[in-house]
């Protein structure tokens, strides 16, 4: 009996927007609005479509279940864009966040052993101190009536939390505004995003102003982190017991390398420390800023959140709902760039090894097929027992083997700041100027100004 299973179709059968000669669709994709362009094309052409970057075809996937499958099959069938690997390699970085294949597996084993040495409970008093500084900052703004650029504040907050948790160092950027690396960190990911759109790695042969600035930013961060590594090595030398019970991530990485003979160089440690800073600062801070954006526009949600937090208790279901709804509407990583490392079939199409793939992971804000009910910001949808959105929600921390190892700390920060905000303040937009989504590898709110009022 003949096989009735239809053969997978070639990628050339996929629909997609017409591109330019030679350049393909690259000129049609704004660097800071890339995700929005790809989301609009998904609405036009469907959940699977085709692009060209130069002469190279790409498959774009916006079906969330298919996105999850691709992420689950890393690193065997899929890996990062080769262009991204080259860009990170040109920057001299060798971290868990950019590694692939066997290097990723080895680094993850070492990194997770180091990270698992930490327990959240002993860190909570330090987190409360840093959150108290943020509260004091906003109290002063409330008393003076000064509009607050909240993304700046929460970026400093998450930098303080990350450096304290991972490095044992109190940067106190919130109070001093003299953090030595914030300005460098804020420029690194946008430059990675810029280079990812350029077909030819010209920076290997000559440097433009932006490339010289990137080199300077990397040098500034390297000097700062190498100082922390030197301090940690001195502490371990003075107190060998720290090798058995490290008190922060850098001590643990040094100790783990020494005890099991892993090839974990100082550059590996620097790269992972930088990756921890970037991942721990940007994504968490942007989620907090977007959450505050929504709350400022929905005073009824603020009051419900305040009542829940003021009542106390071990769990805050409405706070969790607000966080999940923020993840849904404003995921800070709305696109993922991957690469097929084996021949696979996706959605009825034959995808040959070597094909680049873009995952567009945000459902439309007005999509009521996957998320029934009123469109827009409605945290209550997450409280309906009969609705199970968990498997259809966006992927703020990735999925599968590459699930973000710092997700527990990130969610702890978000919950802590949200509870402090609800307990102590009312917020509103300082003006009616539009708040745009600004994409530079992650998605940030542009020009978000809020006014604070004490409760």
Image (cartoon, rainbow, N blue to C red):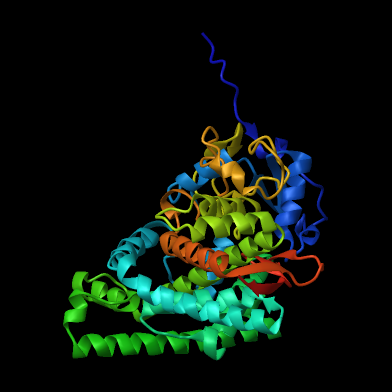
Residue occupying the point 71% across, 38% down: 14
Residue 347 locus on image (x, y percent): 60, 34
Task: Please name whichever residue, 435 or 3, is drawn nearer the observer in this view of the structure.
Answer: 435
Residue reaching furthest to the top: 1
Residue 128 locus on image (x, y percent): 42, 74
Residue occupying the point 25% across, 88% down: 235
Total labels: the figure holds 0
Question: Where is 184 relative to 26, above or below?
Answer: below
Residue occupying the point 44% across, 54% down: 403
Question: Where is 75 relative to 31, above or below?
Answer: above
Residue 103 locus on image (x, y percent): 37, 62
Is 88 placed left or right of 41 in the picture? left
Is 199 placed left or right of 44 in the picture? left
Residue 429 locus on image (x, y percent): 74, 68
Task: Please name whichever residue, 297 or 335, is drawn nearer the observer in this view of the structure.
Answer: 297
Q: Quadrant of the C terminus?
A: bottom right
Is 233 placed left or right of 24 in the picture? left
Q: Is residue 15 visible?
A: no
Question: Where is 30 relative to 317, above or below?
Answer: below
């Amino acid at each position: 009996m003949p096989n009735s299973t239809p053969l997978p179709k070639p990628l050339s059968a996929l629909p997609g927007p017409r591109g330019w000669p030679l350049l393909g669709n690259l000129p049609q994709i704004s660097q800071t609005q890339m995700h929005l362009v790809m989301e609009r094309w998904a609405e036009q052409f469907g959940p699977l479509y085709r692009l060209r970057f130069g002469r190279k075809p790409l498959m774009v996937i916006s079906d969330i279940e298919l996105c999850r499958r691709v992420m689950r099959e890393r690193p065997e069938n899929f890996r990062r864009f080769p262009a991204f690997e080259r860009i990170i390699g040109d920057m001299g970085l060798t971290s868990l966040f950019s590694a692939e294949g066997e290097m990723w597996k080895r680094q993850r084993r070492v990194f997770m052993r180091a990270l698992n040495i930490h327990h959240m409970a002993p860190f909570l008093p330090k987190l409360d101190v840093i959150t108290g500084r943020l509260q004091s900052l906003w109290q002063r703004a409330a008393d003076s009536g000064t509009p607050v650029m909240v993304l700046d504040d929460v970026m400093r907050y998450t930098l303080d939390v990350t450096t304290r948790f991972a490095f044992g160092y109190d940067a106190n950027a919130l109070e001093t505004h003299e953090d030595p690396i914030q300005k460098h960190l804020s420029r690194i990911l946008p430059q990675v995003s810029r280079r990812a759109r350029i077909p030819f790695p010209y920076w290997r042969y000559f440097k433009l102003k932006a490339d010289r600035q990137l080199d300077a930013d990397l040098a500034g961060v390297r000097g700062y982190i190498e100082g922390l590594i030197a301090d940690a090595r001195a502490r371990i030398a003075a107190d060998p017991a720290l090798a058995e019970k490290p008190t922060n991530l850098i001590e643990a990485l040094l100790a783990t390398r020494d005890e099991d003979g892993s090839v974990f160089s100082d550059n590996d440690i620097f790269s992972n420390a930088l990756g921890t800073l970037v991942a721990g600062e940007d994504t968490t801070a942007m989620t907090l800023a977007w959450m505050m954006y929504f709350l400022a526009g929905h005073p009824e949600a603020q009051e419900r959140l305040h009542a829940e937090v003021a009542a106390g208790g071990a769990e805050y279901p409405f706070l969790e709902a607000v966080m999940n709804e923020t993840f849904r509407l404003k995921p800070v990583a709305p696109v993922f760039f991957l690469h097929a490392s084996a021949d696979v079939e996706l959605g009825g199409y034959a995808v040959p090894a070597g094909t680049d793939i873009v995952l567009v992971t945000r459902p439309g804000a007005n999509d009521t097929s996957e998320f029934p009910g009123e469109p827009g910001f409605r945290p209550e949808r997450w409280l309906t027992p009969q609705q199970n959105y968990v498997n259809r929600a966006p992927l703020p921390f990735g999925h599968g083997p590459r699930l973000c190892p710092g997700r527990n700390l990130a969610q702890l920060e978000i919950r802590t700041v949200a509870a402090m905000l609800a307990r102590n303040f009312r917020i509103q937009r300082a003006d009616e100027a539009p708040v745009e989504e600004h994409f530079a590898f992650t998605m940030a709110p542009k020009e978000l100004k809020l006014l604070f009022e004490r409760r």
